[in-house]
Image (spheres, helix red, strand yellow):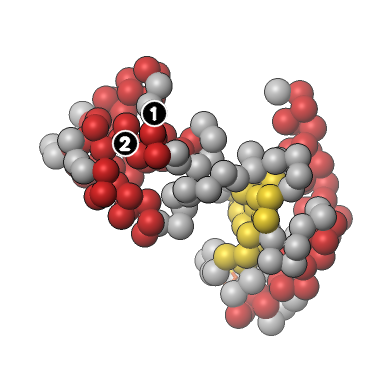
Amino acid sequence: MLSEAEHQELNEILKKYPDKRSAVLPALYIAQRARNYLTDDDIRGVAEALDISVTEVQAIVGFYTLLRKDPTGKYIVQVCTDLPCALRGAEEFYRRLCQRLGLPPQGGTTDDGLFTVEAVVCLAACDKVPLAQINLKYYENLSDDRIDAILDGLRRDSEDA
Ligand code: FES
């Protein structure tokens, strides 16, 4: 469900859209931001705010991979393992990362709920392998040590918050 502050933010965004149904993606991003995933209440709240059906909103959530219906970690670590990156060692990089975080080879969420690690297709930085996108920020030309240091930094930030 959208909070009062989220409703206000959405109302500001709606001023830019002649037809408020067109604002469904920004509305869903606002609703998802607090937890990194959307609950049924969030989806219902967006549908009500935009005067569209819950089914229409669910269809959009199902289509876009950046919109999530399952609980995730605070940080979503996406590593490209698509073919050009795989040819340069990205799959092994991904597997080692999962292993160090105590995750199965296909990825998942750490026990502390901090990191969700997943393999994704092309992130459009094929010349900077291995690379990861963490909560939409790019980290390129990674090594095992470098991504461990990045995740340690995020872990510290999270403890300080
Ligand atoms: S194939 Fe990995 S970034 Fe393009």
Query: Element at badge 1?
Result: loop
Total marks in image: 2
Report whether 44 appears left or right of 87.
Answer: left
User: Could you classify mark 1 by the number of other residues whose Cα lies within 10 Å: few (under 14), some (14-19), or many (20 or more)?
Assistant: some
Q: In which quarter of the image is residue 41?
A: top left
Report whether 69 appears left or right of 75.
Answer: left
69 to 130, vertically: above or below = above
Residue placed most toward the observer, 45 or 32? 45
Q: Position of residue 68 (x, y in %)?
A: 48, 49
The dot on residue 44 is: 2
Residue type (three-letter) at the residue carrying disc 1: Met
Ligand 1 image-quadrant field:
bottom right
Which residue sits furthest left?
Answer: 18
Question: Residue at left 54%, top 35%?
Answer: 35
Q: In which quarter of the image is residue 114?
A: top right
Q: Determine which residue is flagged by label 1.
A: 1
Q: Position of residue 53 (x, y in %)?
A: 21, 43
Residue type (three-letter) at the residue carrying disc 2: Arg
Query: Looking at mark 1, is its residue's CB closer than 8 Å to ligand 1?
Result: no
Query: How far separated are the C-alphas under marks 1 and 2?
Result: 7 Å
Q: Which of the two discs, 1 and 2, labels the residue nearer the N terminus?
A: 1
| Disc 1 to disc 2: CB gap under 8 Å | yes
Q: In which quarter of the image is the N terminus?
A: top left
User: Could you classify mark 2 by the number of other residues whose Cα lies within 10 Å: few (under 14), some (14-19), or many (20 or more)?
Assistant: some
Question: Residue at left 21%, top 29%?
Answer: 15
Report whether 109 appears left or right of 13.
Answer: right
Question: Residue at left 64%, top 43%?
Answer: 73
Task: Look at the image and tell me whether residue 146 can be seen.
Answer: no
Question: Residue at left 52%, top 31%?
Answer: 34
Q: Position of residue 67 (x, y in %)?
A: 44, 49
Query: Element at badge 2?
Result: helix
